[in-house]
Amino acid sequence: MVQEPRQPTSPLARALREYRERFKVTQTQLASDLNVDVKTIGRWEREETTLSDVRELSRLASMLGIEPEQLGVVSSIYVPLTYEQVDETIDHIWNLARQSRYFEASPLVERFLQGLIPQIKTDDHAMLNRLARGYHIAGHVTSILCRTSETDIALRHYYEMEQVARTIQDDTLLNLALTYEGDMYRRKGDLSNAIKYLQAACDTTPHANNAARGNAIQLLGRAYVQAGNKSGFERAMAEAEDLTYQISAEETASIVHGLYNLGTVYEDYNRSYTILGETQKALEYLEKAEKALRPITIHWQTLLATARAATLVQAGDITAGVDVAIEATHLCLSTGNYRLLERIYAIQSTIESLTRTMDQANSRLREALSGPVEY
């Protein structure tokens, strides 16, 4: 008779096992996420050792996105998050996002903000800075996981980020907030507000660093394309490309978290020239993007596959384009990247439109061929 595995009795062992089962995470990966030794994770899960340090339990709860009470911390014992714990949690959530582990990041970031907001004091600018960065990652994760109809959720996070950035007079954080508010409006199709916010990011934050400024200009170029302003798009993208050569890898990683670099600029060129119907230019920039976006993460793989599918379909290579689109679809669904999945729906709409046009043309030709033949 096969014995059922013994269920853990300690809150910590139970929480760790439930987390790993829910998100299909190994002990090694979780140990890396929590910044502890993998042997420690094993001992905690097997209940060979206990943890009674309230501050450490609170840190683990924050990193797992659960209430401290679930780890046995008495609710009457309030342990405020330290600057170091806030920084660690924000870095951890960005790390999950870089690995396209959005399903894990989403509940974690929401719980993190719920725990952080009550301890905010208006005169503590250091913690307010961290709150703004918390809203930044919350907006990013939400914008990836949501469809266009749900972008107001992400927009609210970026709005809160803007208010905090204005309070502490931080131009870089303000630039980022205005930029992503504008990008959410662009995604909703509200191009008037999109361009207004993106231009404000460029024009009203003189002390923002180059990484934030370049990111804003790149997304402004994207909005110009949708508004039919090709010359504005090319000016903005040329400036965005120039700025990538003026920033360090460290600045890109710490401020825009790798989302603005030479590779993303090339990919935006590709996407925009695909929309404009200039497929040869689009393919050239796609090749540049594929060389520049290194190391190739799941996110970059998904982005590039989606871009290639759209360009191939626009160029008339439907079969190859659909093959790549199917690959990109699987990647989007496995990671929860509904933002990129919407581009694949756009590809499907393009194919359906082309099919209708071909059917109508074929029908007209068939009618002509079926008519009288003169000798």
Image (cartoon, grey):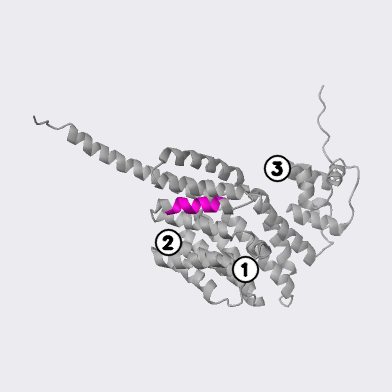
Residue 31 x, y percent position in the rendering: 79, 48
Q: Return the residue at label 2.
A: 225
Residue 345, can we see it? no
Q: Secondary structure at mark 1?
A: helix
Q: Return the residue at label 1.
A: 161
Q: CA–CA distance between discs 2 and 3? A: 41 Å
The crowd level at tag 2 (other Cα within 10 Å; few <14, some 14-19, many 20+) is: some
Q: Which of 190/369 is in front?
A: 369
Count every numbered label the image shows and give the total: 3
Q: Secondary structure at mark 3?
A: helix
Marks 2 and 3 close (CB-CB < 8 Å): no
Residue range corresponding to the magenta coloring = 281-290
Predominant secondary structure, magenta span: helix
Residue 149, compared with residue 352, is above or below; it is: below
What residue sits 50% from the left and 57% below the top? 268
Quarter where residue 90 is shown: bottom right
Sequence-first disc among 1 and 2:
1
Q: Return the residue at label 3.
A: 22
Quarter where residue 246 is shown: bottom right
User: Is 143 displayed left or right of 368 in the figure?
Assistant: right
Examine the structure image and report whether residue 282 is included in the region drawn in magenta: yes
The crowd level at tag 1 (other Cα within 10 Å; few <14, some 14-19, many 20+) is: many
For the C terminus, which image quadrant?
A: top left
Q: Secondary structure at mark 2?
A: helix
Marks 1 and 2 close (CB-CB < 8 Å): no
User: Is 132 displayed left or right of 10 in the figure?
Assistant: left
Examine the structure image and report whether residue 253 is included in the region drawn in magenta: no
Q: Which of 166/73 is in front?
A: 166
Residue 39, can we see it? yes
Q: Amino acid at mark 1?
A: Met
